[in-house]
Image (cartoon, rainbow, N blue to C red):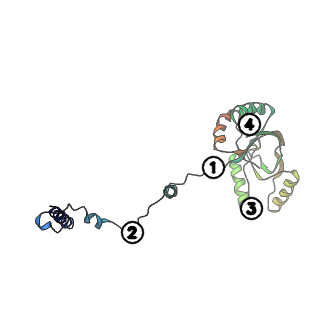
Amino acid sequence: MLRLLVLALLLANAGYFAWTQGLLADYGYAPAVQAEPQRLAQQVRPQAMQLLTAADARQLENAAAPAAPAPAAAECLQAGLFSPEQSTALRTGLESSLPIGSWTLESSVEPGRWIVYMGKYNSEDALAKKRSELRGLGVSFEALVNPTLGPGLSLGHYSSQAEAERELAKAATRGVRTAKVVLERPEARGQLLKLPAADAAIKAKLEALKPQLAGKPFQACN
């Protein structure tokens, strides 16, 4: 009996081995095929696949992400001069709109402006004729800052009367005969508004201060 049992087990093991190896496929006995050769044929460089750590994956994500635009750099801006009355109203607006320490109001002097002047002319036609004459002489000119001197022309502006007189003498050597030195803008004293580091947030808040700025534009600090 024991021999028959051993013989049966040997036959069973041999049959199972033959079944797993496909030796009985011709008789209709074979395990289901698990391989998918058509998928293997579709693989592209499978040897190039790499397993990444979480840190490696984050590094690749950061490298692929578009760089954030750099924030606009802060710049120094100034406006003025403001009279005592204007400064009082402006200070009130600044204190309610801008952070403490982001602005200053300081006493300042705007020097007088002297010009080599030609005018007044009695008509725009006469002014146009004078411009044409100056171009013919190779003498440059500029618009007037003080509208009360128009219609007229400036051949240059200077911070002192002596400097303007020297330039008048040079203009005479080039054929300019009717020019003279005049004070176009007298010295002015007042308060100068300065924003040492105006960034985008501060610039946005300046819109609320337009009524107190009295039409004076902001410029880059000297």
User: Which residue is under mark 3?
Assistant: 137
Query: For this rendering, which residue is in front, 147 or 135?
Result: 147
Q: How many residues crowd mark 1 within 10 Å: few (<14), some (14–19), many (20+)? A: few
Of circles 4 and 1, the one toward us is 4
Of circles 2 and 4, the one toward us is 2
Residue 211 vertical position relative to residue 154 in the rendered view, above or below: above
Q: Secondary structure at mark 3?
A: helix
Residue in view at x 65 percent, y 34 percent: 208
Measured as percent of width and height from the top left, residue 112 is found at: 83, 46
Q: Quadrant of residue 172?
A: bottom right
**Cα gap from disc 3 to disc 4, whole angstroms:** 55 Å
Q: Amino acid at mark 2?
A: Gln
User: Which residue is under mark 2?
Assistant: 47
**Cα gap from disc 3 to disc 1, whole angstroms:** 47 Å
Q: How many residues crowd mark 4 within 10 Å: few (<14), some (14–19), many (20+)? A: few
**Cα gap from disc 1 to disc 2, whole angstroms:** 47 Å
Q: How many residues crowd mark 2 within 10 Å: few (<14), some (14–19), many (20+)? A: few
